């Protein structure tokens, strides 16, 4: 594997423009001072209760995501490019979804194969012919971006269902500003704090026609045992909306109401952080205790807007991912600004045989997997694991894709021995409302804290960093 | 507000209040049992502590004997006792987590911060008297800080009123339970058969509702059992008296009624109980029987809890 691109230090020893001030500051700051503030940051996180749960670990029900105090910095120019690319990509995702559940031009033009849609468990036939307000399906998108050099941003994954992590973007900044006022004073960092306002106006802008002039928005959570519960309560608080669980809602005459101390109150827009499968036991999984019976019929009747829409999983599926450059070209007639990672679709015999021959070099992912689970990182895997994957691939090739092992860019990060480069990715959050798309400058930077590790997922020992976009 | 949110706020306040009350009870019992036997007679104070906490039946399923070690363990840390201090704090934190959006950051900070600190006590236990005393003090301080931060930082709206309802309902229940267990030492002079031994019982009662100093300020007298009963039942200047709790319950329910534009069964019921307290004097109560009076109050009070739940919380 090639040496990774470091976002601060050039191979020759020069410091890249955006990091110059930080680099100077790091030289002036004694290691003890850094260590002290790092400790302080951890205390703050624990005190505020910013925790997440790891499924299957009873004793560690609430854990902290490690926070790294060294910010990750993007120049204004880099951000402008990224922003343009993200807007383009999300626009195409929305057009794709509208098309898949309506005319299906893209299938007739043979850009995407039919069976990838119709045989896909995340395709929702309930959405066929169903109009959604202003044709917005993905109101909140989290697009995972990686860098391998100074010039390109590459999309690793589109998250169009219920992307999480935005609370870390906001809290990380809050804590950094508390702990490092001096460092902020030496930079012009674009603020992220208007995200909740943007989100609320985005959600209100897509209220159904039958809603009142002041539509009621609620955030629906699976409950306190969900791994992202902290984020749900955090956002509901910042938005000033009710945090509801399925049992707080009731459907009457195809309208959704919440049970309040003053009786039933109509809900117009639900920012739901519950997966499609669990939304409505009458339509989807009958064993779901998290959902609301009849919610889908209210949705189909157009009396409530769900954000994101039902059925968006078909757009962020890893098998569909490999077609995204063509999808962008098909709908927008433009070249994609953000690149895709080269992807072998194991469902195609030619690709499969290449993948089987190169398992030791590739990353193999489950098409429907997420959270960094169920993937093979060839160069880091043992022979036995590789062979196990080989069997899985042969048995069910359509369940997998493969990608080259990318040398993700690195950023300086606090480790026990001082500062060392660690691999990072970036998840910016793209909001699409009735008539505009907004992206707060920044996002969630995840960092793989183990030396050499490429897995940034919090469930697998990843941490986070504050992401700075310089206002130049 | 969401019914579930109101319910969580209500129970959060109840659990914190209950934890404090249990800590006070243990504290007061430790003091009285530390006295030489000649001062306290043959009564088993640990047995009374269980009764006032209302967990006697569950206790004897787990332990053969009500002695200090067993009762302290059961009331403080026992996992299978739903009302142990530990379970109250855990339940309070769980409720707090469910309604974080309705809490001020100060309230969350208090409950979460205490919960974090108590994790160590849970795992290590309180092995010495000093450790136990420190733990009991910490629990009481947590309740004071929580209550104080609610008082100082919450918006005066339904969220606040519902949490106050939980607090006062629980308080009234606790005070009534002490009276229920100890009424026999509070009878008027000619009726009760105790002697100077009871003096320590009386101070113990007052201590468990933090009213020992208050008594002297109110009555400027040595301890007289009927005055203690008067203080705990009818004196509305004492925050833990039944009268004071019902004054607060009526006030908070009225505020909810005004804000929502309608009254209901819980307003009526609370007013009924308060009126009965207002129109009673100790002579009548003794005449009719303290025990009966308290029993009736306890059942009225838990009835109010049910009515509030039905009217607002589900």
Image (spheres, coloured by chain):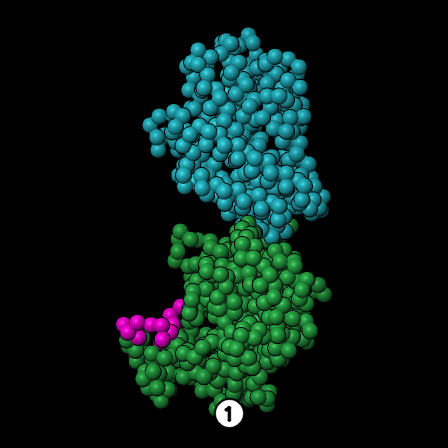
Chain colours: A green, B cyan
Tell me the element at label 1. Answer: loop
Residue drawn at (63%, 51%) of the image? B1
Front residue of B290/A5: it is: A5
Chain name for mark 1:
A
Q: Is residue B162 above or below residue B36?
A: below
Dot 1: few (<14), some (14–19), or many (≥20) neighbours within 10 Å? few
Is residue B127 in the magenta section?
Answer: no
Q: Residue at x 46, y 16 (%)?
A: B35
Q: Position of residue A74 (x, y in %)?
A: 60, 72
Q: Position of residue A398 (x, y in %)?
A: 37, 80
Q: Which residues are magenta?
A: A371-386
**Number of numbered discs on residues:** 1
Residue B109 in view of the camera: yes
Instruction: Reply yes or no: does residue A381 show up in magenta.
Output: yes
Where is residue B187? Give x, y as percent.
Answer: 55, 14
Q: Which residue is mark 1?
A: A109
Residue B255 lies in quadrant: top right
Q: Is residue A396 above or below residue A332?
A: above
Query: Looking at the rendering, in which quadrant would you find the N terminus of chain A?
Result: bottom left
Please give the name of the residue rendered at 61% of the width and 26% of the height, measured from the top-left corner.
B241
Query: Which image quadrant for residue A288?
Result: bottom left
Query: Front-most of B87 and A249?
Result: B87
């Amino acid at each position: 594997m090639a040496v990774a691109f470091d976002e601060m230090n050039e191979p020759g020893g020069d410091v890249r423009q955006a990091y110059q001030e930080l680099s100077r500051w790091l030289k002036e700051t004694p290691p003890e001072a850094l260590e002290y503030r790092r400790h302080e940051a951890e205390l703050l996180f624990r005190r505020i209760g910013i925790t997440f749960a790891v499924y299957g670990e009873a004793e560690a029900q609430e854990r902290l995501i490690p926070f790294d105090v060294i910010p990750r910095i993007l120049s204004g120019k880099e951000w402008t490019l990224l922003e343009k690319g993200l807007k383009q990509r999300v626009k195409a995702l929305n057009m794709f979804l509208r098309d898949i559940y309506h005319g299906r031009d893209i299938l007739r033009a043979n850009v995407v194969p039919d069976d990838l849609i119709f045989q896909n468990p995340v395709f929702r036939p309930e959405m066929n012919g169903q109009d959604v307000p202003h044709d917005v399906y993905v109101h909140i998108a989290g697009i995972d971006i990686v860098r391998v050099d100074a010039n390109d941003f590459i999309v690793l994954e589109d998250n169009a269902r219920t992307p999480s992590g935005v609370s870390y973007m906001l809290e990380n900044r809050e804590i950094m500003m508390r702990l490092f006022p001096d460092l902020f004073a030496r930079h012009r960092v674009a603020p992220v704090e208007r995200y909740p306002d943007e989100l609320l106006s985005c959600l209100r802008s897509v209220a159904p026609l039958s809603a009142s002039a002041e539509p009621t928005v609620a955030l629906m959570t699976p409950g306190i045992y969900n791994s992202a519960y902290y984020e749900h309560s955090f956002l509901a608080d910042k938005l000033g909306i009710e945090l509801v669980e399925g049992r707080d809602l009731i459907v009457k005459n195809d309208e959704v109401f919440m049970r309040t101390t003053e009786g039933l109150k109509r809900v117009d827009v639900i920012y739901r952080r519950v997966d499609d499968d669990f939304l409505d036991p009458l339509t989807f999984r009958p064993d779901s205790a998290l959902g609301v019976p009849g919610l889908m019929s209210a949705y189909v009747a157009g009396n409530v807007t769900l954000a994101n829409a039902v059925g968006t999983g078909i757009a962020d599926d890893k098998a569909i991912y490999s077609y995204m450059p063509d999808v962008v070209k098909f709908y927008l007639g433009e070249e994609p600004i953000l690149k895709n990672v080269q992807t072998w679709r194991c469902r195609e015999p030619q690709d499969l045989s290449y993948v089987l021959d190169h398992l030791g070099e590739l990353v193999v992912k489950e098409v429907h997997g997420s959270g960094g689970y169920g993937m093979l990182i060839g160069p880091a895997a043992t022979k036995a694991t590789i062979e196990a994957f080989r069997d899985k691939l042969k048995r069910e090739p359509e369940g997998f894709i493969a990608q080259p092992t990318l040398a993700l860019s690195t950023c300086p990060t606090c480790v026990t021995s001082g500062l060392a480069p660690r691999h990072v990715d970036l998840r910016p959050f793209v909001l699409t409302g009735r008539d505009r798309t907004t992206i707060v400058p920044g996002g969630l930077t995840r960092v793989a804290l183990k030396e050499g590790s490429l897995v940034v997922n919090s469930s697998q020992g990843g941490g986070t960093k504050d992401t700075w976009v310089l206002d130049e | 507000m969401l019914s579930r949110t109101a319910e969580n706020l209500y129970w959060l306040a109840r659990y914190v209040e209950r934890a404090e009350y249990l800590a006070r009870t243990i504290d007061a019992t430790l003091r009285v049992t530390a006295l030489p036997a000649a001062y306290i007679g043959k009564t088993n104070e640990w047995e009374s502590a269980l009764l006032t906490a209302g967990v006697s039946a569950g206790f004897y399923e787990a332990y053969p004997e009500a002695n200090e070690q067993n009762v302290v363990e059961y009331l403080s840390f026992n996992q299978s006792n739903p009302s142990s201090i530990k379970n109250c704090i855990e339940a309070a934190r769980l409720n707090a987590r469910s309604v974080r959006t309705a809490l001020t950051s100060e309230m969350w900070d208090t409950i979460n911060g205490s919960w974090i600190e108590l994790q160590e006590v849970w795992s290590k236990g309180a092995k010495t008297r000093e450790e136990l005393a420190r733990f009991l003090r910490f629990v009481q301080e947590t309740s004071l800080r929580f209550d104080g931060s609610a008082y100082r930082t919450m918006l005066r709206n339904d969220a606040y009123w519902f949490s106050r309802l939980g607090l006062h309902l629980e308080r009234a229940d606790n005070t009534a339970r002490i009276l229920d267990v100890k009424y026999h030492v509070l009878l008027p002079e000619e009726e009760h058969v105790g002697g100077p031994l009871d003096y320590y019982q009386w101070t113990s009662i007052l201590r468990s509702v933090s009213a020992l100093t208050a008594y002297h300020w109110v009555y400027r007298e040595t301890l007289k059992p009927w005055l203690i009963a008067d203080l705990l039942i009818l004196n509305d200047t004492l925050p833990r008296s039944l009268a004071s709790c019902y004054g607060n319950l009526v006030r908070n329910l009225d505020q909810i009624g005004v804000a929502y534009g309608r009254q209901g069964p819980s307003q009526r019921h609370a007013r009924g109980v308060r009126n009965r307290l207002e129109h009673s004097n100790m002579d009548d109560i003794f005449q009719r029987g303290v025990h009966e009076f308290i029993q009736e109050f306890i059942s009225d009070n838990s009835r109010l809890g049910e009515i509030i739940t039905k009217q607002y919380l589900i």
